[in-house]
Image (spheres, helix red, strand yellow):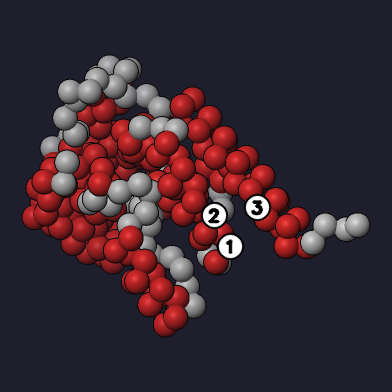
Amino acid sequence: MTPPRASISTKRFLLELNRDLQEINQNVRNSVSFDFLHGHSKFKPGDPLSTIEIAVLTLEDRRYFSHFGFELRAVPRLLRRYLRTGQLGGISTIEQQVVRIVTGRYDRNVNRKIKELLLAFFINFHLGKREILHFYLNSSYFGYGVVGCNEASQLLFSKDIAMLCIEEAAIIAACLPVPMPRLLVEELRRSGGHISPSSLFKEARHINSRWEREVNFRTQIVLKKSHRVLNNL
């Protein structure tokens, strides 16, 4: 007797979910290093949030330490967006973005979104919040050929990420939704990086004014609202 098609689909879905969960766990555990943020390789429970952590969480996921991979309060907004536009993107937690980085799945459909939410939830039972966050910071795309926040920091300010002030960290965090364009990256590499945010914005304004405006806007959000992240700890 042939098994019902629905049961076959469910079994395949669960197998894929388990495979993806194992892949995420392995990738995060094998790649996470804390020295680029705190100057030592192992996380110490007393380590305060670094400036880049504060900046990224301010822009990307302010309640990161208060949820388990998804925000219930975001569900109504997600449904309204889907009904209005037919799209499911635009509202994601750090865990959901980590799922996309590891699996390489960025297509926006209902099946993918359900799997992404489940994986984002389950990885919280296998990995620590700081592990997940550090993997995200060290694996995300910040601009043309630039992967990881420390590489972005060296390119922009010729500094290790742990040495940044909050304004410099805010600029790097702002590059996550608005990656650095190719012409700007090439100019930064030729010039050897900038030592101040003002000089960066001045040059970027001539190369790509739209990028400069958007990054400047997000930088100001961090400067005004970063305290909210600390209040949610």
Residue most extreme to the front = 1
Q: Secondary structure at mark 1?
A: helix
Query: Label 2 belongs to which residue?
Result: 115
Question: Is residue 151 among what the camera can see?
Answer: no
- Cβ–Cβ under 8 Å for marks 3 and 2: yes
Query: Which residue corresponds to the image point at 25% horizontal and 32% vertical from the top-left?
Result: 161
Structural distance between the alpha carbons of marks 3 and 2: 8 Å
Rendered view: 101 above or below 213? above
Q: Is residue 97 left or right of residue 157?
A: right
Query: Label 3 belongs to which residue?
Result: 13
Q: Give the number of the mark in front: 1 or 3.
A: 3
Rendered view: 26 above or below 119? above
**Residue 177 horizontal/vertical position (percent):** 34, 57
Rendered view: 104 above or below 220? above
Query: Which residue corresponds to the image point at 19% horizontal and 25% vertical from the top-left?
Result: 47
Determine which of the numbered discs, if any, sits on residue 230 in the image: none
- Cβ–Cβ under 8 Å for marks 2 and 1: yes
Question: Is residue 218 among what the camera can see?
Answer: yes
**Residue 59 horizontal/vertical position (percent):** 24, 54
Label count reads 3
Decide which of 66, 31 is in the foreground and name it: 66
Quadrant where the N terminus sits is bottom right
**Residue 99 horizontal/vertical position (percent):** 48, 46
Question: Residue 84, located in which quarter of the rendered image?
Answer: bottom left
Query: Label 1 belongs to which residue?
Result: 111
Q: Secondary structure at mark 2?
A: helix
Residue type for callout 2: Lys
Structural distance between the alpha carbons of marks 1 and 3: 9 Å
